[in-house]
Structure formats: C-alpha cells, structure tokens
C-alpha cells in the first residue's frame, strides 16, 4: 500500500532542464521539486531528469539522486571514466554538500547532530524509519540560520546518504520539514505547497583535472 495514495505525478515543464555547468565529462543541474531523478515503474512515471538529459546527451548517467520532492543540485557523468571517478568521491565522502530546509517550530539546540540508524518502513514504503536493531548508520549535522514564529531555516549537512535521511532526522527532532507529504503533521504540511528541502551547494573534484569545483543552486523558498 502506498503511503501517499492521493499523489498524482505532474512533473514541472518549465524550465525543462536547468543546467548549472557542462563540459565534456560532467553535467551539473538544478532539479526542480516534483521531478523524479530516474524513471519510476509506471508508464506515467517515465518523464524524469535522467530521461530529459539523455534526449540531448545520450551518454549521461546518474551518479546520485534526490527525492522527487527535493530540489537542487544533481551531478551526472558524461562518460564511464567520469562516472567511476565521481562515484568514488561519493563512496569515500570526499564531496562537500549542504542543503537548506525550512522546518516546523524552533529548535532548542541551534546547532547539533542527529546520529540515528534508518531502515525502510516496509508496510508504509517508501517511508523510512529509525531502527536501532537493523537500521543503517545515518549522520546529519544541522545549524539554524534563521527563525520565524512558526518555522526555522536550517543548513543540513548529511554525512551519510540514506534514503529520506534529512526528512526522517528532522522528524526525529520533532521538527518535520514544511510541506513534507510523507512525514509532516498537518500544521507543517499547511505552511508550504512543496517540500521545503533544497540541495544548495556541492563541491567535487573534476574527474579528469582533479581541480575542485563548487556549485550553487539558488534556493526557491528563502
């Protein structure tokens, strides 16, 4: 059974592709909220970032993913050597990245870490949950950037890359991300018409030259 039965996939069409950086080895894009990174199983879920890119750059491959509802930076490789080199940076945690998120309420601790293992909540998939017995280690650092009466703007740095990690870790603190159709309570859901989570910054080493490259994607909700 789906955890979100009312969902209808309506991927945004404009901009069709938002390219931040392109050379012969590397493509960096700003993915909009509401667009799948890779195709889903159903026919109506075939339109996705990967499909759109491969129409114009057939050799492009996905190195990492973002949730459909999350916006921001996605890095793709344009040849096998680049894919291997960039994937290795992710595996060795040599990439630097941070996200921006608006969460419900105000945090008592303005800076800290969440170190809670995660596993798929199988009867309610695709939801994830904290599980100390069988979960995989997951670590997120957070910092409050700004506070309003009903919400706070946070910088989130995931050290691991578990599915829905930032969403479940913020929920575990009692501060779900605004607009989260899977995890937010009614008050947090009502404050935003989309998930307020954005992949804002990435730094990687160029797969061919070794030069460090930094990328920023403007945040649509701050």
Image: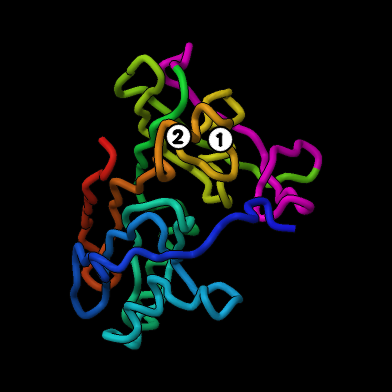
Examine the structure image and report whether residue 123 is included in the region drawn in magenta.
yes
Q: Nearer the viewer, residue 13 or 211?
A: 13
Q: Which image quarter: residue 219?
A: top left
Residue appearing at x 22%, y 56% in the figure:
212
Residue 20, percent from left and from top: 19, 62
> For mark 2, what is the residue?
178
Relative to residue 197, is residue 209 drawn left or right? left
Q: Residues within 10 Å of mark 1 (few under 14, many from 20)?
A: many
> For mark 1, what is the residue?
184
Question: The N terminus lies in which quarter of the figure?
Answer: bottom right
Colour scheme employed for the rendering of this structure? rainbow
Residue appearing at x 73%, y 50% in the figure:
124
Q: Please give the range of residues in magenta.
A: 106-133
Asked if the residues shown at circle 1 and circle 2 are in contact, with their CB atoms under 8 angstroms apart, the answer is yes
Tell me, for residue 219, which label it has, or none. Answer: none
Question: The C terminus lies in which quarter of the figure?
Answer: top left
Q: Secondary structure at mark 2?
A: loop
Residue appearing at x 51%, y 27% in the figure:
187
Examine the structure image and report whether residue 35 is included in the region drawn in magenta.
no
Residue 35, percent from left and from top: 41, 63
The vertical placement of 117 against 216, above or below, is above
Kindly report the distance in space between the C-alpha atoms of the residues bearing marks 1 and 2: 7 Å
Q: Secondary structure at mark 1?
A: loop
């Amino acid at each position: 059974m789906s955890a979100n039965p009312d969902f209808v996939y309506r991927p945004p069409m404009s901009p069709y592709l938002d390219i931040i950086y392109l050379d012969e080895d590397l493509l960096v894009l700003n993915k909009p909220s509401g667009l799948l990174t890779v195709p889903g199983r159903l026919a109506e879920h075939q339109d996705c970032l990967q499909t759109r890119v491969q129409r114009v750059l057939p050799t492009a491959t996905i190195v990492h993913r973002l949730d459909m509802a999350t916006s921001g930076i996605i890095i793709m490789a344009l040849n096998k050597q680049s894919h291997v080199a960039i994937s290795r940076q992710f595996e060795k945690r040599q990439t630097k990245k941070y996200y921006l998120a608006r969460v419900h309420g105000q945090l008592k601790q303005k800076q800290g870490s969440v170190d809670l293992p995660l596993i798929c909540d199988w009867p309610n998939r695709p939801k994830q949950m904290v599980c100390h017995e069988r979960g995989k280690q997951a670590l997120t650092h957070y910092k409050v950037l700004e506070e309003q009466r009903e919400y706070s703007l946070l910088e989130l740095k995931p050290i691991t890359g578990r599915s829905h990690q930032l969403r479940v870790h913020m929920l575990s603190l009692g501060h779900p991300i605004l607009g989260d159709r899977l995890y937010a309570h009614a008050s947090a859901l009502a404050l935003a018409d989309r998930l307020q989570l954005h992949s804002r910054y990435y730094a990687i080493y160029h797969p061919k030259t070794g030069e460090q490259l930094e990328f920023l994607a403007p945040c649509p909700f701050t």
